[in-house]
Amino acid sequence: ETGVTQTPRHLVMGMTNKKSLKCEQHLGHNAMYWYKQSAKKPLELMFVYSLEERVENNSVPSRFSPECPNSSHLFLHLHTLQPEDSALYLCASSQDAAVQETQYFGPGTRLLVL
Amino acid sequence: AQSVAQPEDQVNVAEGNPLTVKCTYSVSGNPYLFWYVQYPNRGLQFLLKYITGDNLVKGSYGFEAEFNKSQTSFHLKKPSALVSDSALYFCAVRPRDTGGFKTIFGAGTRLFVKA
C-alpha cells in the first residue's frame, strides 16, 4: 500500500446527485492532488493543494469542487455531473509540490454517472 | 504544446525475455522524468525517476530507464520479464522551469508478459 487511501472505491450517481470523494494520506506530506483517469487517455491533473492552499486549478468545470481542510485530507465534491465525467479519480500526495518530488497515488474511486 | 508520447498501446513479451517500453517527450528545458506502474484496480505506483546525473536510472522491481537527451527519450527496460510485470505503465514528465505544478503523463502502455 502507498499510504494514500480513497473512499468510496466505487460510486454510481445520477446527474442531479451530490456526492463527495475522500482522500487521506498517512505519509506526512504537504501536497495533495486530484487526477482524472479516462480510458486510453493520459491522466488529467485537476487540482493541486500545497499546505492546504489550492495552487493549481487546471480549467476544471465548477461542478467539481475541491476542499482541503488539513494537510492529510482532500475532498472532491461533485454536483450535477455529466455522463462524460465517468472515470477513475485518483488522489495523490507528495512531500511538497516541488517538481522533483515523487507522487504517491491512492487506489482511486471509479465513478459512473448515469 | 508540451506532450509525452508512448507510441505503443501494448507490448507483448515472453517471460524471461528483455522488455522495453518506449517514451518520448516534447518539453522545453531539462524536465524531470518518471515512470509509474498501475496494476488492476490500483493507483499508480512509482518505479523510478531521472533528476540529474547518470543517464541510466535503476528503480524498483529490477526496472531501469535510460535518459537520452538528444532523442528526448526515457525508455523503460528490464533484462528479464516476469509474468507479474504485466500491468499498465505510464511515463511522466515534469518541467523544471515553469514554476507550475503540472506533471504531464503519457497515455500508458499495457505490458503483457506471457508465461
Image (cartoon, coloured by chain):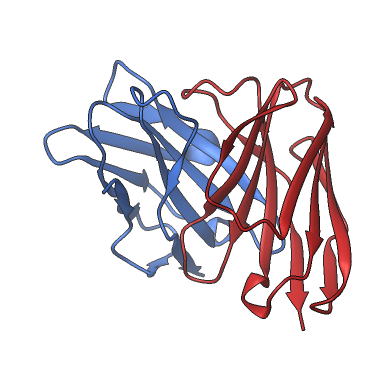
Q: Nearer the viewer, residue A48 or B69?
A: A48
Q: Colour of chain A?
A: red
Q: Residue at x 75, y 45 (%)?
A: A66
- Which quarter of the figure has residue B84? bottom right
- Can you say whether A88 is above or below B30 in the image? below
Residue A67: where, in percent of width, then height? Answer: 80, 40
Q: Residue at x 80, y 25 (%)?
A: A71
Residue B44: where, in percent of width, then height? Answer: 61, 48
Q: Is residue A107 visible?
A: no
Q: Nearer the viewer, residue B96 or B46?
A: B96
Outermost residue toward the left?
A: B70
Rendered blue, the chain in question is B
- Can you say whether A111 is above or below B89 in the image? below
Q: Quick check: A44 left or right of A50?
A: left
Residue A5: where, in percent of width, then height? Answer: 83, 44
Q: Quick check: B74 left or right of A17?
A: left
- Can you say whether B51 is above or below A46 in the image? above
Q: Nearer the viewer, residue B3 or B49?
A: B3
Residue B83: where, in percent of width, then height? Answer: 55, 62
Q: Quick check: B1 left or right of B114?
A: left
Q: Is residue A76 visible?
A: yes
- Which quarter of the figure has residue B66? top left
Outermost residue toward the top?
A: B53
Q: Nearer the viewer, residue A58 or A32?
A: A58
